[in-house]
Image: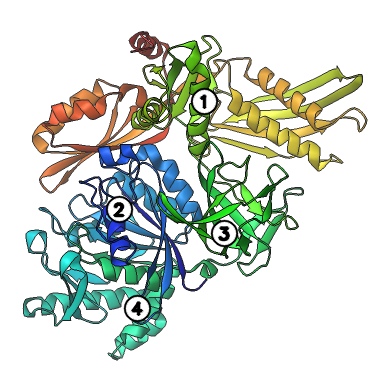
Amino acid sequence: MSSVRNVGVIAHIDAGKTTTTERFLFHSGSTHRVGEVDEGSTVMDYLDEERQRGITIVAAAATFPWTPAVDGEHAIHLIDTPGHIDFTAEVERSLRVIDGAVVIFSAVEGVEAQSEKVWRQSDHYGVPKVAFINKLDRLGASFRRVLDEMREKFEGVSICPLQIPIGEEGALDGVVDLLSMRALKFVGEHGGELAEEDVPDGMLLEAAAARDELLTILADHSDVVAEGYLEERDLSVEFLTREIRALTLSGKIVPVFAGSAKRDIGIQPLLDGIVRYLPSPSERGICEGHDPKSGATVEFSPDDKAFRGLVFKLLAGSGADLLYVRTYSGELNAGDTLLNPRTGEKVRAKRLLRLRSKNVSAVEKVGPGDIVGVIGPSGVVTGDTLCSVGSPVLLERIAFPEPVISIAVEPRSTKERARLDSALDIICREDPTLRLRTHEATGQKLLSGMGELHLEINCHRISEEFKVDARFGVPQVAFRETISSEASVTGTFAKTLKERELSAEVDISLTPVPKQEPGIVVESSVSGDVPNAWVGAAETALMDGLNTGGNHGYALIYIKGLVSGIRGEREKTNEAAVAGAVLVAIQEAISGGTLLLEPLMRLDITAPEEVIGEITGYLQARRAVIQGITTLSGAKHLSCEVPLAEMFGFSKSLPKLSGGRAAFSMEPCGYQEISREDLERLAARNSAAFA
C-alpha cells in the first residue's frame, strides 16, 4: 500500500483538469498520444456529450504507474472530476474515496467560485492537497496574484510554493525548483525530456527570496526546520522533502506547483509531488464503519484480513452493472462471494477490472487501498458497502445534495412508455442527484436534477443514447416547504392487521431552524425502558416522513425533529406501529399550514467595468440581492443571491449583456420563502408545460 496513491483532480470548470490528466497518462506511458480537449480526443472525457461540449460531465478513473527519480515505481489511481456545479455529485463521491487531491487553478482567472467549493469539500473529508497553478503561458497570467488569492480565501492553512515560473505569458520557459535551486526545462516533443540547468542569472535574487519565503513558512510549522534555518545550516532536499510531506499530511500546508499543461511545462514535477507529498492508503489511518444490526462503531485497519469496500459509482448495463469500488481492507478475488449489509443479500464479484476511463482490463485479485471495477453484484446502489460475509460492516454513505430543478418527461406514444421507464431507471441509478417522481395531479413523470445543464444532458441521453421518442417540459424549480413555528404533538396508531391488533403512541416536536445546513436533523430523547428497535424505527420514520412532503406535496426542510416519547405494549407494538404513529404525528404537526420555499443560488460574475451596470440592472429586475461588487485587474466581480427560478436562460443572456466578455458561476445556497404573487407569476410563465 505504501506505493499506492488514490488521487482526485478537482477545480473550477475550464481550469485545465482534463488536459493535465491527459498529460499524466502520456508521460506515464499509459497512452501513446496526447489527448486534446479541443480535438475531442481525450481518454478521460470519453462520452460524446463531453467531447462535443469540451467539458467533463462524469468522474472518470484511471490507473497508471509513475516512478520518481529516487522513490521507486508507484501506482496512481486517479479520478478526473467535473468542474461544473451541476455535476457536484461526481466531485462529492470522488472525494469520499480518495486519499489526496490535486487542486488546479487557472493563472488567469485565479481562485474561482467552484475552486473554493471543491477546496472546502476536500477539507470536509480531511483530504491532504497539492495545488497546481496552470495556464501560466496565457495572456494575463500571474503566479503571484493567484498565490495571494489562495492565501486570502483559504485561511487556516499555509500556501507553500515549491516552484516559481521562469517567465510568464508567452515568455514561460520552465520553472525553478526552490528545494534544489535548479531550473527545470521541458524539452523534446510534448516536453518529454526534463533538463536541469542553473537558475538564470536574471532570476537569482527572485529565486533566493522565494526560497527564503518557503523556508520561513516551513519554519512556522516545524521546529527542526526552524532550528536549521536560524542556524543557517544547509538544509538538504531530502530533509525538506520529508518535512514538507509530514506537514502536508497533517493539513498544515499545501505545496504549490507551477506550469502549463497545454505546453507540457511542469507535469513531471507535479507527478513527483503527488507521490512524495500525498498519502498512501495506509497513512490515512484507522477506518470506521458501523455494525449493521446494533449501529455500534466498528474500527478496522487497512491490514485487516476481512474485505471491505465502498461502491462510489456505477455504470448501469443491460446484463450487469459496472461498479466502481474503493477497497479499504482485505483482498478481493474474482469470483468471491460478498455481503451487501444494507440488504443482507450475498452477491458475487464475477469479474474484477483495472480501470482506465472507458477502457478496462481484467485482473484476478486486488488488495486494500485499490480502486477497481467490479462486475456481477445485483441490487447494489451507489454508497453501498461490500464486505466479507463473516465480517459485516456498513461504511459511511456518501451524502449528495438535493435536486433544485425539475422537468416533466413523457413518451410521445404508448409503445415508447416501457423504453422510457427503462431509460429513466438507468440514468437515476447511475446518478444519485437525479430523482424521479410522479406528479399526483397530472400523472406525469418529473425528473429532478441539479441545474439546467444537468437535465439537458440527461434528456439528450434519453433521446440519443437510449433512442426514446419523448417530450420534455419546461424546467421548473423544485420547491420545498417548512413550518413557521414549533409544534409538539402526539401521534396515535391503532389498527388491526391480519387479525393482530397493533398500537403505538409517539411524541414528536418539530422546530423551524432557518438555513440549517443539512436541511433536516432528527434526534431522540426517549427515556425509560423502550426497545432500541422502536427508537430506531421512530427516527427513520420521522426522517422519511419529513422528506416525503408537506401540505403542498414538496419535501420539508429547515426543521429539527425530536422524538421525545414512545409508548406501547410488547404484544401490540412493533416497529411498523411506531412508524405509523410518527407519520400520523407529522400530519397533525403540519396541519396548521406550511410555508412554501424556493431555491436560492449564489451567483458570481466577472465582467468589464463598462457593462457591470447593465448586468446589475438585469439581475435586480429578477429579485437578486447584490452582496458586493469588487474591483479586479481590469474588471469587476459581482456577488449576489438570486432565486433559481429567475435564472433560466441566464447563460444565453449574459453574453448578450456583456458582448461575450463576462464569466459566471452559480451554486445552490439555500431556500427562501416565496410570495403568492411571485408564485403565480412563475406559474403563468411556465403554463406551457411542453415545448
Number of the front mark, 4 or 1 = 1
Number of residues whose C-alpha sits closer than 10 Å to that of mark 3, classed few (under 14), some (14–19) or many (20 or more): many
Number of the front mark, 3 or 4 = 3
Mark 3 touches mark 1? (CB < 8 Å) = no
Dot placed on the residue nearer the N-terminal end, 1 or 2: 2
Location of residue 629 by image quarter = top left
Disc 4 and disc 2: Cα gap in Å?
32 Å
Number of residues whose C-alpha sits closer than 10 Å to that of mark 4, classed few (under 14), some (14–19) or many (20 or more): some
Amino acid at circle 4: Ala
Report the disc number at residue 17. Answer: 2
Q: How many marks?
A: 4
| Residue closer to the observer: 90 or 36 | 36
Could you tell me which residue is drawn at 41 percent across and 67 percent down? 252
Callout 1: helix, strand or loop?
strand
Residue corresponding to mark 4? 219
Residue 424, relative to residue 271: is it above or below?
Answer: above
Residue corresponding to mark 3? 327
Residue corresponding to mark 1? 436
Amino acid at circle 2: Lys
Could you tell me which residue is drawn at 24 percent across and 48 percent down? 37
Could you tell me which residue is drawn at 62 percent across and 61 percent down? 333
Callout 3: helix, strand or loop?
strand
- Image quarter hosting the C terminus: top left
Amino acid at circle 3: Thr
